[in-house]
Amino acid sequence: MTPRALVTGASRGIGRAIAAALASHGFEVLGTARNPSSVVGEQKVPGVQYLALDLEDEESIDSVITHAGALDVLINNAGGSQIGPVEEVPVEAVRRLFQRNLFGSLRLTQGVLPGMRARRNGRIIFVSSYAGVSPVPFLSAYASTKAALTALARGLRQEVMADGVWVSVIAPFDIRTTIPLELQFRDDSSYKAALLRVKEVRDRSLEEAPDPSLVARKVERVLAARSPRAFYPVGRNARLMGFLLKHLSDRTAERIVRKLFRVDA
């Protein structure tokens, strides 16, 4: 029987690369986009059926759950990004970000889990971010959503492992994507100069980063593993960063991050 997979945020970037990889390996792929009719030309992956999904709309999420039916694989990838000082970012904007990056994925997972557990078979992958492990200044709200997503996934893994469902987190580090970055700061902000320096470093780093296909290949390896691990960093220098964070003091790690992102320039 052909395995069925649902990939959220499949219209571009990491989600599109994952959908293309799964389709090329014989999966029946359902991919979501906020507006499927806008997915045209080369952006559209052959063999992928596109569904409308707005992670801020409960009815839209429930509609995808109903349409998707029985799934072998769920890839929770869709989400948003945001930059702004904690002091100034509107709380409502952070709530919306949590809805897109955490609560929407939680609801989708709740919708497909009963079927996976009943069949005693399923794979769920949460595409998080290394920012959830090592936050960057002014990307604090975004990092907090990814840290929460990672914690949710790792706890869920323990809940359903005995039922034949494997849950893993993939945490990209410096992957070239087109995810929109919301700017949340005042024009007269005293943080503005430092924030814009951080954004400049971040944008340049993403432009020079590896292609999203690197994440897709990691997804393939996770799905092929008999007993996949809980957490997979992926991207340029991801393993090195993990090693340094493990062995450096917090003060030293903070000093490196501040210098790297020119916070005090």
Image (spheres, rainbow, N blue to C red):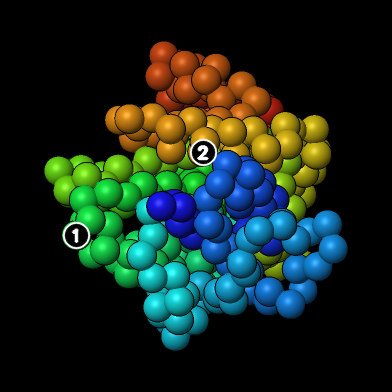
At which x and y percent is residue 239? 52, 20
> As drawn, which residue projects farthest toward the front?
1
Q: How many marks?
A: 2
Q: Say whether marks 2 and 1 touch (CB < 8 Å).
A: no
At which x and y percent is residue 224? 43, 32
How far apart are labels 2 and 1 at the CA level?
24 Å
Callout 1: 10 Å neighbours few (<14), some, many (20+)? few
Instruction: Tell me, yes or no, if residue 186 can be seen here.
Output: yes
Residue at 68% x, 74% y is 36
Callout 2: 10 Å neighbours few (<14), some, many (20+)? many
What residue sits right under mark 2 in the picture? 219
Q: Amino acid at mark 2?
A: Val
The answer to whether 165 appears left or right of 209 in the picture is left
The answer to whether 39 appears left or right of 86 in the picture is right
At which x and y percent is residue 117? 21, 56
Q: Secondary structure at mark 2?
A: helix
The answer to whether 132 appears left or right of 212 in the picture is left
Please determine whether, in this image, residue 154 is positioned above or below residue 86. Answer: above
For the C terminus, the quadrant is: top right
Please determine whether, in this image, residue 258 is positioned above or below residue 34. Answer: above
Residue at 75% x, 61% y is 44
- Mark 2 vs mark 1: give the one in front: 1
Residue at 49% x, 47% y is 127
The answer to whether 191 appears left or right of 31 in the picture is right
Which of the two discs, 2 and 1, labels the residue nearer the N terminus? 1
Instruction: Tell me, yes or no, if residue 106 can be seen here.
Output: no
Pick the front one: 248 or 105:
105
Please determine whether, in this image, residue 36 is positioned above or below residue 42. Answer: below
Residue at 22% x, 45% y is 164
What residue sits right under mark 1 in the picture? 118
